[in-house]
Amino acid sequence: MENVVVIASRAEVPPARYVNQAEAVVSRAAWSDGTLTEIAASWLTPSGRLYKMKAAEAPVTEGASLKLSRTVRYQIQGSPIRAVDVLRLNR
């Protein structure tokens, strides 16, 4: 993969050089409310997507800035079924 940056820091305030620069934000099961969607929106380009991993039965948490595009369910070697919500900027 080219042009990939991994930033290990608090997500709430992106470093100035990364504001609205990410094509993808990936999150493991964090923030069960809509907090993550608003935080991710500050990182994303207009065409960017948030990939939010979660338990399959967990509800979709959209926010004012991001809306659900699709949900992908998956299972790895007999483990519980999980899901990834793909959200995009609400325009």
Image (tube, grey):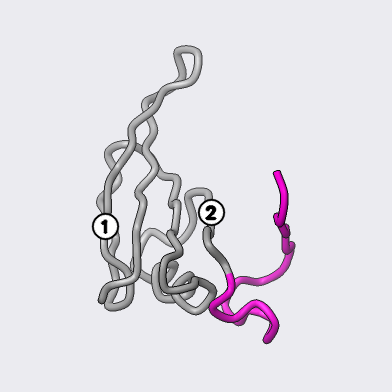
The correct choice, above or below, for 16 with respect to 63 in the image is below
- Residue closest to the eye, 21 or 39: 21
The 10 Å Cα crowd at callout 2, few under 14, some 14 to 19, many 20 or more, is few
The 10 Å Cα crowd at callout 1, few under 14, some 14 to 19, many 20 or more, is some
Q: Quadrant of residue 91?
A: bottom left
Q: In which quarter of the image is residue 61?
A: bottom left
The residue sitting at the bottom extreme is 16
The magenta stretch spans residue 68: no
Residue at x-position 50% and y-position 13%: 77
Residue 29, given in percent of the width and then of the height, sits at 48, 49
Looking at the rendered structure, which numbered label has been put on residue 19? none
Name the side, left or right, on which 59 lies relative to 42: left
The magenta stretch spans residue 9: yes
Residue 47, given in percent of the width and then of the height, sits at 42, 66
Circle 1: residue type: Leu
Residue at x-position 52% and y-position 58%: 24
Q: How far apart are marks 2 and 1 (CA)?
A: 14 Å
> Would you name the residue on which mark 2 appears?
26
Which contiguous range is marked in magenta?
Answer: 1-21
- Element under disc 2: strand
Residue 5, given in percent of the width and then of the height, sits at 72, 59
Looking at the rendered structure, which numbered label has been put on residue 68? 1
Residue at x-position 43% and y-position 52%: 52
Q: Main secondary structure of the magenta part?
A: loop
- Element under disc 1: strand
Mark closer to the chain start, 2 or 1: 2
